Amino acid sequence: MASLDLEVEQRGESLRIRVRVKPRASKSRILAVREGMLQIAIAAPPVDGEANSELVRTLAGALGCGKSAIEIVSGAGSRSKLVAITGLTLAELLAKLGRAET
């Protein structure tokens, strides 16, 4: 479950999590938490920022927040990314990710 394993850093008004993206999946969805990182399957290919845009859409949908609340802080060209999320408390983030895991 996400609440037990996910490493979350509070930085000002945002929460930062590490994400490992698996592009070109059949469907975009949150998979699991492994080694403190949130594993996310993305249906888009890693071309011209499509996977990053799909990552933001997928997280926004799972967390019930706007896309503007999610920012890729580092790793835009990598499968491993640092993502900042604003507008949620730690408890809300963990509860919503726990429900979103498949």
Image (spheres, grey):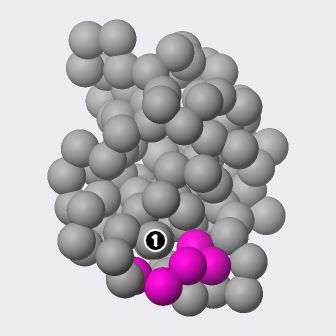
Name the residue: 44% across, 21% down.
86
Number of disc labels: 1
Q: As displayed, is residue 11 above or below residue 81?
A: above
Name the residue: 36% across, 69% down.
49
For the residue pair 89 and 70, the one nearer the viewer reads as 70
- Crowdedness of circle 1 by 10 Å Cα count: few (<14), some, many (20+)? many
| Quarter of the rendering containing residue 71 | top left
Specify the amino acid type for callout 1.
Answer: Ala
Q: Is residue 65 left or right of residue 50?
A: right
Name the residue: 25% across, 20% down.
11
Q: Is residue 97 left or right of residue 22?
A: right
Q: As displayed, is residue 70 above or below residue 52?
A: above
| Quarter of the rendering containing residue 20 | bottom left
Residue 66: image location, x then y, percent: 60, 30
| Quarter of the rendering containing residue 88 | top right
Q: Is residue 40 magenta?
A: no
Label 1: which residue?
51
For the residue pair 52 and 17, the one nearer the viewer reads as 52
Residue 26: image location, x then y, percent: 72, 87
Q: Secondary structure at mark 1?
A: helix
Q: Is residue 45 magenta?
A: yes
Q: Is residue 100 left or right of residue 56?
A: right
Q: Is residue 33 left or right of residue 17?
A: right
Q: Quadrant of the C terminus?
A: bottom right
For the record, the magenta segment spans 42-46
Q: As displayed, is residue 93 above or below residue 49?
A: above
Q: As displayed, is residue 95 above or below residue 100?
A: above
Res. 85 visible in picture: yes
Prevailing secondary structure class for the magenta stretch in the rendered image: loop
For the residue pair 98 and 87, the one nearer the viewer reads as 87
